[in-house]
Image (cartoon, helix red, strand yellow):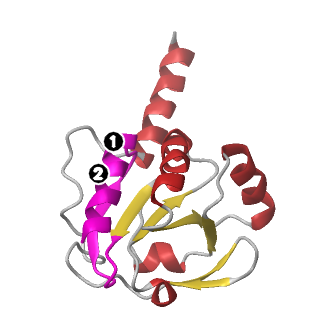
Amino acid sequence: MRTSFFFLLCVAMTLGGCARQAGAPHGDQRSGGRGVAVGEPAPALTLKDIDGKTVSLAQLRGKPVFINAFATWCPPCKLELPGIVKAYPQYKDQVVFLGVDEQEDAELVTPFLKRFGITYQVALDPGSFADAYEVHSLPWSFFIDKDGVVRKIERGFMTPDELKGNLAAIDKG
């Protein structure tokens, strides 16, 4: 009994650190308290993608951008990714999808991308993205309009319907 309680407590603490609390407000506040905010320009971003190519937010200006911060070890990320993978073909001509893996190397991330069927661009963050965007838990998503302004911030797991609604909103903007 004591072992079961301890196990459940550990699971609850792990998931609680990765996912948004049910009913918690989201999308209209600052990313983590003082950094990225809805209605403000997205911070500059320059990272290397999984193939070693440079990707910067400035290069993507002119199209809406969806950035999803994740990690291979994150249970809510694994639950959310199939919805993102499914939405990508529908929105890829209107919205740039960019996955940002948090502080893991390409050797670990590449098989994970294949396992989930991720075909959109994925960058590797050594910590600079998480610092600039104040990412404190995963998954964490940003919806940026074609002018580089943050329009929505989602902390924690997003349902496929929430994702599609957010993508449609930045595509119209």
Numbered label attached to residue 161: 1
| Residue 32 visible in the current orientation | no
Which of the pair 102/58 is nearer the observer?
A: 58
Q: In the image, is 3 to the left or to the right of 145? A: right
Magenta residues, start to end: 144-173
* Residue at image location 71% in from the left, 50% down from the top: 112
State the residue lying farthest toward the right: 107
Q: Residue shown at 50%/33% (left/top)?
A: 10
The verdict on residue 146 being magenta is yes
Residue name at image x 50 percent, y 77 percent: 129
Residue located at (31% from left, 46% from top): 162
Under mark 1, the amino acid is Asp
Q: Which mark is residue 165?
A: 2
Q: Determine if the magenta segment contains residue 71.
A: no
**Which of the 4 image quarters holds residue 140?**
bottom left
Q: Split into 4 quadrants, where in the image is the C terminus?
A: bottom left
Q: Residues within 10 Å of mark 1 (few under 14, many from 20)?
A: few
Where in the figure is residue 34, as x and y percent of width and height? 25, 76
Regarding residue 105, the answer to whether it shows in the image is: yes
